[in-house]
Amino acid sequence: MKLKRIIAYIIDSIFVSLITSMIALISFLNPTINEYNKTYKEYQQFNQDIVATESEIDTDKLINESTEYYYKLQKYSLSTNIIEIFCLVGYFVIFVSSNNGQSLGKKIMKIRIAPNKGNVKWYNYLVRMIILNGTWITILSCIMLFMLPHKAFYITSMVMTYIGYVIILTDLLFMLFRKDERSLHDIASNTKVIEA
């Protein structure tokens, strides 16, 4: 069952990433895509110039410019992040809840989400999605983008990303080593995964 869950998640992640990417290419839904691409090319050139330089690198300047590029890239990817959140909610909450607890990956692997106690409600699927996909990081990043100065935003984003990695690793370790094979997102959402 453990391997089935991992494979199902990989299938679902690829599917949602493809859908998100296709929608993000629609310019009226993602009006800053050209600014993002331009800034990303500038950032690549900036990095190449640093590597090619033979003189001593000014660390303060490097940090300030890198932080500024990071901030701009995050600002210009705000529409993509919002599209991603809608796609994740649409797929992992609405689609799965209306499909007897099965995503495409789970359907292929012949497993499904079931209640640990009681019934599975839409908010149980939402909690699973927020923890499993690190959606909380994306939501907080979108909010902090407008609240924090550039350097503070950069540092906070990095810290949240590392916390997200720890949560995902903990989630996986729970599934691999608990007798009931329930992950952190299963426990938080009062669900479990069973054979379909």
Image (spheres, helix red, strand yellow):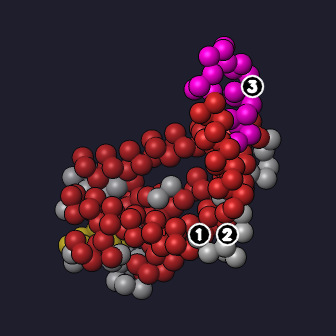
- Looking at the rendered structure, which numbered label has been put on residue 30? 2
> Does the magenta run of residues contain 54?
yes
Looking at the picture, which amino acid does disc 3 mark? Answer: Lys
Q: Are marks 2 and 1 in contact (CB under 8 Å)?
A: yes
Q: Residue at the location (45% across, 41% down)?
A: 166
**x and y, in percent, of residue 35 in the image:** 72, 57
**Above-or-below relation of 151 to 31:** above
Which SS type dominates the magenta stretch?
A: helix
Given contact means CB atoms under 8 Å apart, are the residues at marks 3 and 2 in contact? no
Left or right of 80 in this view: 187? left
Q: Residue furthest bottom?
A: 98
Please report the bounds of the magenta region as a residue range.
50-70
Which quadrant, please, contains the C terminus?
A: bottom left
Task: Quote the CA–CA distance across marks 3 and 2.
Answer: 31 Å
The mark total stands at 3
Q: Residue at x 21, y 52 (%)?
A: 179
Q: Is residue 113 visible?
A: yes
Q: Which residue is mark 1?
A: 24
Residue type marked 1: Ala
Q: Nearer the viewer, residue 6 or 115?
A: 6
Up the image or down, 134 lies above or below 71; here it is below
Circle 3 is placed at which residue position? 61
Mark 1 Cα shell of 10 Å, populated few (<14), some (14-19), many (≥20): many
In what element is the residue under mark 2?
loop
Q: Secondary structure at mark 1?
A: helix
Q: Is residue 194 above or below residue 43?
A: below
